Image (spheres, rainbow, N blue to C red):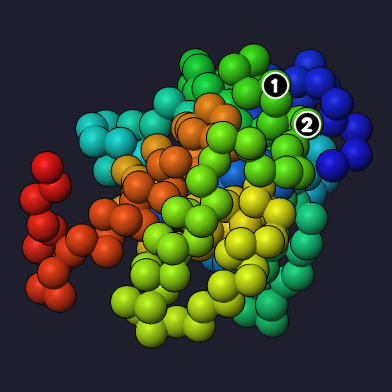
Amino acid sequence: MPGYRRTSDLPQIIPIFPLDGAVLLPGGELPLQIFEPRYLNMVDDAMAGDRVIGMIQTRAGGERARPNLTSVGCLGRITSFAETSDGRYLITLTGICRFVAGEELSARTPYRQLRVAYGDFEADLSPEDEGPPEMDRERFARALKRYLNRRELDVDDETAMTAPIAPLVTSLAMGLPFEPSEKQALLEALTLTERVRSLTALLEIDALEDDDGAPHSVQ
């Protein structure tokens, strides 16, 4: 992502798009369909400025129109934009760096804005290309194969074993239908090693579930 070498290069006040079940990870690409007026306004303002938006999930509490927010989200840059004939925006956000949510501003904009801090996630601006040496690639590949087989999806064993691990894990963490809290845990995993472990565990837990959705007890 051009121009972002240090967290000091990133904006400290950002517009946010709260959306449960959809997380953005650094380097990942998230397609979004925007139709609500306040978020159309947000995209207009972003496109006229530095093209960045913060993706964040919600947590229990707060008002229905302004729910409480999780503590960690991810800043993304609009890298694709199209407008439909009925006024919707089709955009793609590319993840830049995770942030810790801070003070919410009393903004006049119809969308919410936060002051954020990126210090805990400086490493997001220097993405890892290779897998961490301590990860168990075979265990990960087995868990992924079982997970996809349960859903009758195609399995490419070679991809699971040989593809660059960072983009593979990013796409799976963002794309697989985990619960919002599980996606949040994947987002907050500090390192690639931790994210691989968490993702492998989620895939293995799924394999232990009965067909009726009841999990087996694990000793």
**Where does the image place residue 79, in percent across and percent down from the top left?**
79, 55
Q: Which residue is mark 2?
A: 126
- Residue at 13% x, 69% y is 210
Which disc number belongs to residue 131? none
Please, what secondary structure does the residue beneath circle 1 have? helix
Q: Assess disc 1: are there few (<14), some (14-19) or many (≥20) residues with their C-alpha within 10 Å of its C-alpha.
A: some
Q: Which residue is mark 1?
A: 122
Q: Are marks 1 and 2 in contact (CB under 8 Å)?
A: yes
Residue 87 position by quadrant: bottom right
Please, what secondary structure does the residue beneath circle 2 have? loop
Asked if residue 128 can be seen in this view, the reply is yes
- Residue at 10% x, 57% y is 216
- Residue located farthest toward the right when viewing the structure as drawn: 2
Amino acid type at mark 1 = Glu
Q: Assess disc 2: are there few (<14), some (14-19) or many (≥20) residues with their C-alpha within 10 Å of its C-alpha.
A: few
- Residue at 39% x, 32% y is 69
Q: Is residue 109 left or right of residue 44?
A: left
Amino acid type at mark 2 = Ser
**Where does the image place residue 122, in percent across and percent down from the top left?**
70, 21
Q: Is residue 196 left or right of residue 152?
A: right
